[in-house]
Amino acid sequence: MDKYNPADIEAKWQQVWQEEGSFDVPNPEDPAAADRSSKSYVLEMLPYPSGTLHMGHVKNYTMGDVIARFRSRNGFSVFHPMGYDAFGLNTENVAIKTGIHPAELTRQNTGNINKQLHRLGVSIDWSRELATCDPEYYKWTQYFFIRFFERGLAYRKEAPVNWCPSCATVLANEQVVQGGCERCSTTVEQRNLAQWFFKITDYAERLLGDFSLLESWPERVITMQRNWIGRSEGAEVVFRVEELDLDIPVFTTRPDTLFGATFFLLAPEHELVGVITEGLDEAEAVADYVAQARQQSMVDRAMAEREKTGVFTGRYATNPVNGERIPIYVSDYVLMEYGTGAIMAVPAHDQRDFEFARKFGIEVRVVVSGEGAGQGDGESLEQAFEEDGVLVDSGRFDGKGNRAAGEEITAWLESEGKGKAAVSYRLRDWLLSRQRYWGAPIPMVYCDKCGIVPVPLEELPVLLPDVDDYAPRGQSPIATNEDFVNTACPQCGGPGRRETDTMDTFVDSSWYFLRYCDPHNDDAPFDKGVAEYWMPVDQYIGGVEHAVLHLMYARFFTKVLYDLGLVGFQEPFRNLFTQGMIHYRGAKMSKSKGNVINPDDHVERYGADTLRLYILFMGPPELDVEWQDQGIEGTFRFLGRVWRLAMEIIEKVGENNVTGYAHEGEAAQALVRKCHQTIAKVTNDVAERFRFNTAISAIMELVNDAYLAKDELFASKEGRGVLRFTAETVVKLLDPFAPHVCAELWQRLGNDRLWLEPWPKADEQFLEEESYELVLQVNGKLRDRVRVPASASKEDLLAVASGSDKVARYTEGKEVVKEIVVPGKLVNLVVK
RNA sequence: GCCGAAGUGGCGGAACUGGCAGACGCACCGGACUCAAAAUCCGGCGGGGCUCACCCCUCGUGUGGGUUCGACUCCCACCUUCGGCACCA
């Protein structure tokens, strides 16, 4: 008997798949007329080519491959493409260090990943492979940028932005994690810079509302996006500055507390700070405070525990509900980026305002009275009362519930022209310009006469020029390339200067799933009809770390494309699965912790099939799991066991000995039944639940049963038929997980291409057992088990129960007060 | 502080709709094969107790309560771990 030798087997089948293009799917001739019901777009998040794949990638692509292969064998036309998120800082930083051109590094890295994916046996349509750094790709990224610009969805403005001093570039809000840079953790600084933004805030409402269009997304991802968008309902209320002809609007979620406003606050960056203090004695102190506030980092400013600071402006505002004059202060706990940058302060009912008022000796006036802490006056209050209650000291709204009163007050203000209901979002616009080299150039030209002018669409792509030095200096390295920078204004033909910033790589990855549909199209980013045919992605798989980054950006992009009439759907990913991470030695794998496991080593030692199988067998795919060095040994042993079982059957049964299967005899019948039960379980686990770990364990059980029964079964003709059927079933079921060894065994069993073979179907008649083990309980405690025929009636079961000696031992001399009979399961006698 | 997920043998995990807790795998122990070892095949493997190899009893799914004939599963409170948000008005 040949030994199980994964190296030979895997190379052999990978070559077949590559030469035959086994997983390539052509676009339909007439996409509009084509039947979409049998297509399935299976997609894993595309890799960033930073050298080699790590275990997280292996898990990601193996899971996707199992689903793709499973669906394919279930009759779906599976669309399973692959590409590379090839622009970006990692590559650029390596380029700076080594002096090798980023394009060359990318070529090496993508080539390497391509090889690794082939070695893992992932079933991909390689004819659609793409890299986002190819001009044929980023041409269309630039094209979208211009279309966004024309719609007013891409704009340039000067604003305080996040600056990472280590990466020497600005970052989007989503890329700042706990005050640090997402990539390098360096503390992010605030700088006032002119930058390009996408107006994602215009889509806040749709990004929230369209969750209803999704079929199956993890609840926590939706929650994370909800939190990130941070929608708050409330009111915009206008306060008038005394003596000046100035109205300042504020946003509040608590219009019910308006009568308790005892002061007014402006953010230090508020444009009216200078205006209202002009000519006053307080002007200097205010200016000092503002300057101080500006120097603070965003992290420091965002600390909730910090003591409140502020300064009086010398001006007063008029409260629109009661005409009261309240002092205007400037304080850094008011954020310019949220709401209107100004707030009304109600110290009795907002903890932050309360702290400020106590420090500055401002009146605390209770206007909502509630249970417990809500009793008492402002003087005795120890902290703000933020709960619901009844309004007091609020004019004609006294005695009303605060929630309802809030709505009435808002309506009243609206009729007076002093306010209106309003919604505010935490979400900020997406800052997409980067002062770095390795990205798609922003296709814009600055002209002294015409201003900002987009490059004409027919002149795209704006190619990324070569430079000598990629080191970041606060502006993109391409700014030093005069040939690139100097150009003619597309509008007036006069001298113009090109934009030298490049795009955030998240722009590139916001539409790649569309390009796969039509990757070689030179005339358009994609053919609308073809995209309509394949899209949306039926199953998207990736890491949860992209919950508010890639996944939200891609949703936004798709909605804009929908509005532009380029696609007919509003959500790109119908179903999302987020995989858990693989930990090693108690921590997530990272180079800095030195606990990285290289997949290549394991492929070399055990083969791709073993690695794939182990990674899925470790635990439920959505949970974080711990890599165990000895664990993989077990899966390798299992594949060896499968191999020996199949080979023994091939040798002893012969290729065409018995084609069907009979099931005379108890052992034969039991094994046939087990085969069908396993088919049913594996099918359900893979299709409905993505529970690959239990699917694999079910196959292991079948193999174990076959080992125990085989010596007896080899003796008879029926037995041999059953064994052949068992071997074929195991191979068919294991194929999505371990495709190479299964393809090989399938061939040795005398068949052809396994990946074209229909998925097996469980025969109902074998699923039902003829008898089962009935559990007998007394007062809910297990006392006996008895085998009973499946057809037994409730009465029969009761009779069995009372016939049991063990049960009798516990019911003796007691009164049976209740009999619970669950056919198929148990009988429970309740006694007193 | 708010929101969410998770806590089961020595370990990873199973038990899908409340019904035999611990499937499957790892580790460990024993047996077969062998001159021997490895590999392989077979068996055992939560704790405690007993008239201790057979059988039987009892406790046991983070902690404390509750609902139920019956709870790993449902409800309440708490503890721990992980993740998200957090001076967002």
Image: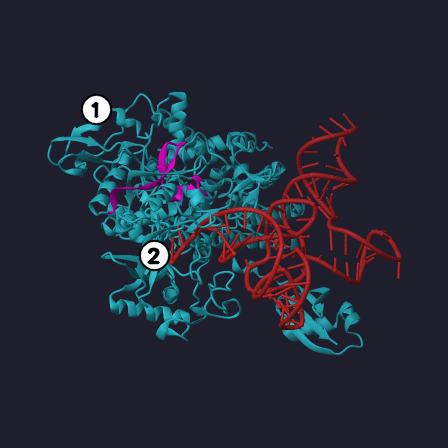
Chain colours: A cyan, B red
Snapshot quadrant of residue A223:
bottom left
Q: Is residue A23 above or below residue A261?
A: above
Magenta stretch: helix, strand or loop mostly = strand
**Residue under pointer 2:** A424
Of the residues shown, which amino acid type is indicated by label 1?
Asp
Task: Let me know if residue A159 is in the magenta part.
Answer: yes
Q: Position of residue A831 (x, y in %)?
A: 73, 75
Does residue A188 appear anywhere in the picture?
A: yes
Between discs 1 and 2, the one toward the N terminus: 2
Q: Nearer the viewer, residue A401 or B25?
A: A401
For label 1, the SS is helix
Q: Nearer the viewer, residue A92 or A749?
A: A92
Q: Chain of mark 2?
A: A
The quadrant of the image that shows the C terminus of chain A is bottom right
- Compared across the picture, whether A594 is left or right of A788 comes to left
**Residue under pointer 1:** A483
Q: Nearer the viewer, residue A614 or B31?
A: A614
Residue name at image x 41 percent, y 23 percent: A97
Of the residues shown, which amino acid type is indicated by label 2?
Ser
Q: Is the residue marked by circle 1 packed among few (<14), some (14-19), or many (20+) residues within 10 Å?
A: few
- Compared across the picture, whether A553 is left or right of A594 comes to left
Which residue range is magenta in the image? Answer: A153-181
Give how far apart the Cα atoms at labels 1 and 2 are.
Answer: 45 Å
The quadrant of the image that shows the N terminus of chain A is top right
Residue name at image x 62 percent, y 66 percent: A824
Image mark for residue A339 = none
Task: Let me know if residue A133 is in the magenta part.
Answer: no
Does residue A696 appear anywhere in the picture?
A: no
